[in-house]
Image (tube, rainbow, N blue to C red):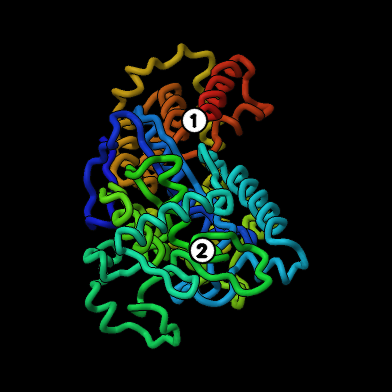
Amino acid sequence: MVKLYNTLTRQVAPFAPIEPGIVSIYSCGPTVYRFIHIGNLRTFLMADWLRRTLHAAGMDVRHVKNITDVGHMRVEMLDQGEDKMVSQARKEGKTSADIAAFYTAAFRDDETRMNILPANVFPRATDHIPEMITIIEGLVQKNHAYAVGGNVFFDIRSFPDYGRLSGNRLAQLLEGARDTDDTARRNPEDFPLWKVAEPGREMAWDSPWGRGFPGWHIECSAMSMKYLGPQLDIHTGGVDNIFPHHEGELAQSECYTGESFVNVWMHAQHLLADGLKMAKSTGNAYTLSDIEARGFEPMALRYLFATVHYRSRINFTFSALRAAQTSLRRLRLALLRLHEQAGDHAPICAEELQANEWHQRMSAAIADDLNIPRALAQIWRMLRGSGERPAMQLAILHEIDIILGLQLAEWLAVQPAAPHTLAPALAELVEQRAAL
């Protein structure tokens, strides 16, 4: 049984999908105005481990990960300032569409190199403007939103539960609301669903309220509902998404449908770099290419992230990455030795594998809110003198790595020392993983 921590309830509980055997997952993807950094990759990796775990538990996963290519403002808490896409396009002397296409391709390439399974759908915000307008119209009709001067704002007072995801109370938010020159809002905390376009703005669309562009939060509601329906099993993101993004997304979605929006909210903790928050100004917003340029492979970064639980903060340093790469190489060598010791053994049947105590320990750890670090610790305990026969250890490693995603079978398959007699079995494992 898979158990997951729900940000909404603040509890770990057994997971059961709305539709038996089928899981819907929506993940907040990147705003494609720059290369994603390794902190983003950690969040996407959490969703990858989740997907692999659910698949291993016998569930069919439908995964949607959006591409934000409009409406994400520079001052996120205020929903003010310049659109990040428009700003970057101006800096590079390109169109916003060119910027989005380039950085979307770079993001997809980074995920491939990190062995993150591709989502079933990667919807772009700019392709779903009609769906956003439909939801906004519905919110206005139900008195959850109001239009002023070409802008449309969500009225947070109309949703008494606003703040329950983040732990913020509506009364406290209103009492401590910041001063703002935006007199069009009824409440300073009301967030925009639609923004009026300034003259000459590149990314703008016609709407019932005039020419404009969508707010950030409405984009995810529209895309998740289109591909997964009005209710989701799981919604993932980073802790920085909880407020205001996911809080706003939850409020507008439930006001529009009248139903519970998401059963389980999952958020990955912050990744620090050298003890500091990652930022361009401090020069520590490392990308995967930065990592590789220093001689590290992507799987070393994946291994490093596997050593810390997704709900715990991690401090990235290159010394820690170096240690992770060393550990990964030791694990590969251990795998190669087991492969040589096992020789031309009879295949381990699924029933025998599932009944093995070491396999059960590792599987139980992973099923307990994706406790990958505990599973990794069990692997090393098994390798350091468990007395388990080599063929069984080898089978366990291959099986567990389907979830860990360290590409151990793929690595072993191309080693010159690996006997060719086992190549068909390894090829079958690679094919199984490709089909996930």
Q: Is residue 14 visible?
A: yes
Quarter of the figure with residue 95: bottom right
Q: Which mark is residue 436?
A: 1
Q: Callout 1: few (<14), some (14-19), or many (20+) C-alpha neighbours within 10 Å?
A: some
Give the camera-side residue of 421 and 78: 78
Percent of width and height locating residue 423: 61, 19
For residue 163, side relative to residue 432 (left or right): left
Give the camera-side residue of 195 and 313: 195
Give the camera-side residue of 297 and 135: 135
Percent of width and height locating residue 183: 41, 84
- Give me the residue at 54% from left, 46% from top: 123
Answer above or below: position of 219 versus 84.
above
Answer above or below: position of 20 versus 285.
above
Residue found at the very far top of the displayed protein:
346
- Give me the residue at 64% from left, 57% from top: 291
Given the image, on which type of amino acid does mark 2 rest?
Answer: Phe
For residue 361, side relative to residue 43 (left or right): left
Q: Callout 2: few (<14), some (14-19), or many (20+) C-alpha neighbours within 10 Å?
A: many
Tell which tag, 1 or 2, sits nearer the viewer: 1
For residue 58, side relative to residue 317 (left or right): left
Marks 1 and 2 in Cβ contact (< 8 Å): no
The residue at which mark 2 appears reads as 316
- Distance between the Cα atoms at labels 1 and 2? 29 Å
Given the image, on which type of amino acid does mark 1 rest?
Answer: Leu
Percent of width and height locating residue 135: 41, 54
Q: Is residue 305 visible?
A: no
Secondary structure found at label 2: strand
Secondary structure found at label 1: loop
Disc tally is 2
Residue found at the very far right of the displayed protein:
93
- Give me the residue at 56% from left, 22% from top: 426
